[in-house]
Image (cartoon, helix red, strand yellow):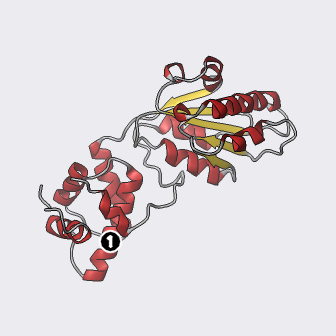
Amino acid sequence: MNQQLILELSTAPTPTLENFVVGANQHAIDALLHCTAGRAVYLWGDPGAGRTHLLHAMAKHHQGHYFSAFTPSAQLLHYAQDDTPLPPLLAIDDVDLLNNAAQSALFGLFNRWRLLQGSSKAFILLTAGAQAPRQLKLREDLRTRLAWDLVFYLEQLSDSARALAIQNRAQARGLQLSPEVVQWILTHYSRSMSRLSALVDALDHHSLVRKRAITIPFLRQLLAEQNPKKHIHD
């Protein structure tokens, strides 16, 4: 059963370094927190590990620019030009999905990043993908450049870490969730922490509006109201 419908009740929180659930990824977070101009970082891992969250968070933290794999390649190519002013950070997500033109633009951007290292125009280049650099189906010279500096694998959170994060967010909002409700959410819902955080916020809102405690029957009722044509069951 698709439980994503409940996200219509609330939008996901803005990604920040502070609201990222670290889990076993402290080494990567420490590197990002201490990242300075002239460094390049490549993050990789399975969907839901937090790659996109961290790229958005770093772009906001450094007043930089975030690009998805579907950003027009001309925008990347613009920053690869020698005379283009650069922001403090450029973040390029899902590099494994880049088309040929975007790969060429990122190749040029890496060359400019290296040329400006140690100068007053140095910038942070942050990239992310689904596989380690050598495993990416990209042009060889770009795969090499993605591994030029720091490379970190982001591990998925364990269910116990997700459960703790859900409880901590609920408690911060004054919301009480039983262990049974938390387990039901982990069993039936997305593994992405941004979606789980949005879910807790949505449940808090509807609990207050309807003056009801959050129970499994209440969860089923909310889903049924959004999609009445489907029968809600375990």
Kindly identify the amino acid type of the residue bearing the numbered disc 1: Asp
Q: Is residue 5 left or right of residue 103?
A: left
Observer-nearest of 191 and 230: 230
Judged from the image, the secondary structure of the residue bearing numbered disc 1 is: helix
- Counting the numbered discs, the total is 1
Residue at 66 percent across and 32 percent down: it is 101
Query: Residue 93, percent across and down?
Result: 56, 40
* Quadrant hosting residue 148: top right
Q: Is residue 45 left or right of residue 211?
A: right
Crowd tier of the residue under label 1, counting other residues whose Cα lies within 10 Å: few below 14, some 14–19, many 20 or above: some
Query: Residue 10, percent across and down?
Result: 39, 67
Residue at 40 percent across and 42 percent down: it is 23
Query: Residue 9, percent across and down?
Result: 35, 69
Residue at 62 percent across and 45 percent down: it is 71
In the picture shown, does residue 77 fall above or below 182?
A: above
In the picture shown, does residue 195 fall above or below 80?
A: below
Query: Residue 215, percent across and down?
Result: 17, 67
- Circle 1 residue: 204
Q: Is residue 192 left or right of residue 73?
A: left
- Check the picture and name the quadrant holding the C terminus: bottom left
